[in-house]
């Protein structure tokens, strides 16, 4: 449940909280906040001069916690595109971002948010929703700590008791064990499980020991966040996974159909992995052959999150990859950089059969790779 951080002064009881709200609206500024705390942005009179009244009023909108606007439009009063920038008010325009083609459906589904709800959702019949308040607590959010006061979920039934410490714990509230996941959406926590043979280092350090393509600012002890990949495509716009022109809410382009390779087609990956290293075959000795000559997208072989069975984020995309004529569909790491794959791959109308022929590893009739 969202709580205001002056909570220690309050009773948990609802009625008391509301009485307090009324009392607060009569109090002169500044509020008697414990001095040890950084003042949350929305309770800071220098940033929000109207105080509680910026969002609450006596009776409020029906069905809300005495809010002065319906839930969806409340935040857009200050975080909307029409904001003139009245002194002290925000100019961060989330409205335009959340209306991009791929987005968190706040405008359509925020109405299903219930104050005090417990996520992940246990009832499959409950409509799926996401509101600004699911990711931000307006009473506690502080510059640089936009999730302060949001309860987290770290997967496998574990709740973060004192609020989310890591961003992914906010995401797992709705993208892991939710009983109402739409068909086609998966439990993302299983992808990043640190017991997997490989995963991008979100929950903890990765298992990749040799990742020669990493750009200088990263190494094998780096930790990255969901929003390093899921966010606004406009690098100068507001940060966060509100919306993007690239689906699913990706910060940059990541083509999943066979296309001619270019710096832009896989720019999401190339923002952390050096294109020259990948196409220079520094790790996998047949990267260039696949990516450039056969126009095979990264997704044919890699899962951007993690792999539950193989190292190097290997998970074959079943749209392009099927069992070979022997019925095999496996990845064998074999010699570093020279793995063996037993499968059939269809790209741009060509079928590439990967199998042993007379004891030799061959791609169709070509047995020249010789590894
Ligand atoms: C930026 C907007 C905003 C401001 C400013 C604000 N609130 Fe709220 N408040 C909300 C929203 C939104 C909710 C409902 C949260 C939900 O539905 O989960 C809420 C809920 C509450 C509740 C219900 C219990 C709870 O904690 O969820 C109380 C009590 C409350 N606010 C008191 C205050 C007081 C007192 C102030 C001034 C010190 C204040 N609020 C300032 C937006 C605001
Ligand atoms: C009365 C104006 C006002 C309203 C209403 C308002 N905000 Fe803000 N908000 C601000 C200001 C001012 C800032 C600081 C400057 C900026 O980010 O533009 C801010 C910053 C933020 C931040 C950045 C982190 C931080 O705490 O500094 C988040 C997240 C945020 N607001 C969420 C919300 C949500 C969610 C709502 C709706 C419940 C909301 N705001 C409603 C004025 C407002
Ligand atoms: C309160 C619930 C909630 C939370 C918390 C939440 N999401 Fe979502 N998310 C949704 C809903 C609802 C959708 C719309 C599609 C669906 O139902 O899954 C969505 C869609 C997405 C999509 C696009 C999926 C697609 O197929 O188009 C991405 C990516 C995403 N969320 C990432 C995140 C990240 C990253 C976080 C944490 C910072 C997060 N979400 C937190 C509810 C949530
Ligand atoms: C390294 C980049 C990267 C990171 C980090 C990342 N994602 Fe993704 N995510 C992607 C890409 C690319 C896709 C689309 C391709 C795909 O589905 O494999 C995707 C797809 C998704 C989808 C929609 C498809 C589905 O399986 O439901 C959701 C939801 C999602 N990610 C949530 C998250 C969450 C939550 C986190 C953090 C715990 C996260 N992602 C971290 C790159 C990333
Ligand atoms: C925000 C930075 C970032 C982005 C974006 C990113 N990666 Fe990574 N990636 C890393 C880091 C850091 C590691 C090293 C983790 C480790 O040592 O296991 C890594 C490791 C890998 C590995 C090796 C994993 C292993 O266990 O051997 C593969 C494969 C990989 N990334 C593929 C991709 C692909 C494909 C994309 C685009 C969808 C991508 N990465 C986007 C940061 C990123
Ligand atoms: C799915 C979770 C999620 C939802 C829903 C969401 N946000 Fe955010 N928001 C984030 C994350 C994550 C960040 C911070 C990203 C970072 O700092 O890298 C953020 C950042 C912000 C910021 C600061 C932006 C900046 O550049 O400093 C504001 C303001 C904000 N959100 C307001 C809102 C408002 C208003 C809504 C509802 C319309 C909303 N958010 C809905 C996750 C969410
Ligand atoms: C045909 C399958 C295939 C395709 C397509 C592919 N990869 Fe790989 N990739 C591999 C294999 C196999 C390895 C592991 C090689 C080894 O360690 O023996 C690997 C390793 C990696 C690594 C970790 C080692 C390193 O070089 O740092 C990264 C990062 C990576 N690939 C990124 C990408 C990106 C980005 C794309 C798309 C532009 C891509 N890969 C396309 C098969 C593929």
Image (cartoon, rainbow, N blue to C red):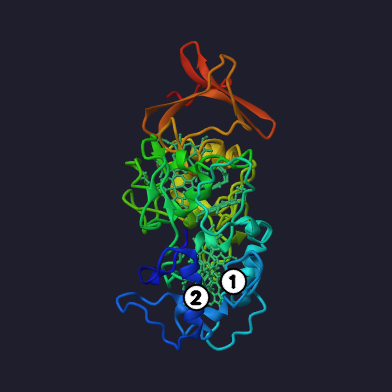
Q: Relative to 42, is 310 above or below?
A: above
Quarter of the image where one finds residue 13? bottom left
Which label number is shown at residue 66? 1
**In this rendering, position of residue 339 left or right of residue 95:** left
Q: Relative to 110, is 33 above or below?
A: below
Within 8 Å: ligand 1 and the Cβ of disc 1? yes
Q: Relative to 251, is 35 above or below?
A: below
Quadrant of the drawing holding the C terminus: top left
- Callout 2 secondary element: helix
Front-most of residues 307 and 146: 146
Which label number is shown at residue 21? 2
Q: Are marks 1 and 2 in contact (CB under 8 Å)?
A: yes
- How many numbered discs sit on the rendered protein? 2
Quarter of the image where one finds residue 285? top left
Bin the neighbour count of mark 1 within 10 Å (Cα to Cα): few under 14, some 14-19, many 20 and up: some
- Callout 1 secondary element: loop
Q: Residue at x 59, y 47 (%)?
A: 261
Within 8 Å: ligand 1 and the Cβ of disc 2? yes
Q: Residue at x 45, y 66 (%)?
A: 146
**In this rendering, position of residue 62 left or right of residue 210:** right
């Amino acid at each position: 449940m969202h709580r205001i951080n002056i909570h220690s002064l309050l009773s948990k009881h609802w009625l008391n909280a509301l009485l307090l709200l009324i009392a607060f609206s009569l109090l002169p500024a500044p509020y008697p906040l414990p001095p040890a705390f950084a003042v949350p942005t929305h309770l800071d009179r220098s940033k929000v001069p109207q105080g509680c009244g910026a969002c609450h009023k006596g009776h409020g909108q029906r069905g809300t916690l005495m809010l002065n606007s319906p839930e969806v439009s409340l935040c857009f009063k200050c975080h909307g595109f029409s904001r003139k920038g009245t002194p002290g008010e925000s100019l961060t325009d989330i409205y335009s971002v959340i209306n991009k083609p791929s987005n968190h459906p706040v405008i359509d589904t925020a109405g299903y948010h219930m104050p005090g709800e417990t996520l992940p959702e246990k009832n499959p019949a409950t409509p799926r929703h996401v509101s600004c308040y699911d990711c931000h607590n307006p009473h506690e959010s502080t510059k640089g700590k936009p999730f302060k006061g949001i309860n987290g979920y770290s997967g496998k039934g574990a709740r973060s008791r004192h609020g989310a410490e890591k961003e992914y714990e906010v995401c797992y509230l709705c993208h892991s064990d939710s009983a109402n996941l739409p068909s086609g959406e998966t439990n993302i926590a299983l992808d990043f499980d640190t017991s997997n043979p490989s995963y991008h280092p979100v929950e903890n350090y990765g298992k990749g020991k040799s990742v020669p393509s990493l750009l200088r600012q990263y190494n094998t002890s780096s930790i990255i966040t969901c929003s390093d990949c899921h966010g606004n495509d406009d690098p100068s716009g507001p940060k966060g996974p509100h919306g993007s022109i690239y689906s699913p809410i990706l910060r940059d382009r990541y083509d999943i159909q066979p296309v001619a390779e270019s710096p832009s087609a896989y720019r999401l990956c190339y923002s952390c992995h050096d294109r020259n290293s990948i196409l220079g075959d520094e790790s996998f000795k047949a990267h260039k052959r696949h990516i450039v000559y056969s126009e095979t997208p990264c997704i044919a072989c890699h899962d951007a999150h993690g792999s539950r069975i193989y190292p190097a984020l290997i998970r074959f995309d079943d749209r392009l990859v099927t069992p070979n004529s022997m019925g095999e569909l496996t990845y064998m790491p074999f010699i570093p950089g020279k793995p063996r794959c037993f499968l059939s791959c269809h790209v741009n109308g060509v079928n590439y059969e990967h199998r042993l022929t007379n004891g030799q590893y061959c791609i169709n009739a070509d047995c020249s790779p010789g590894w």
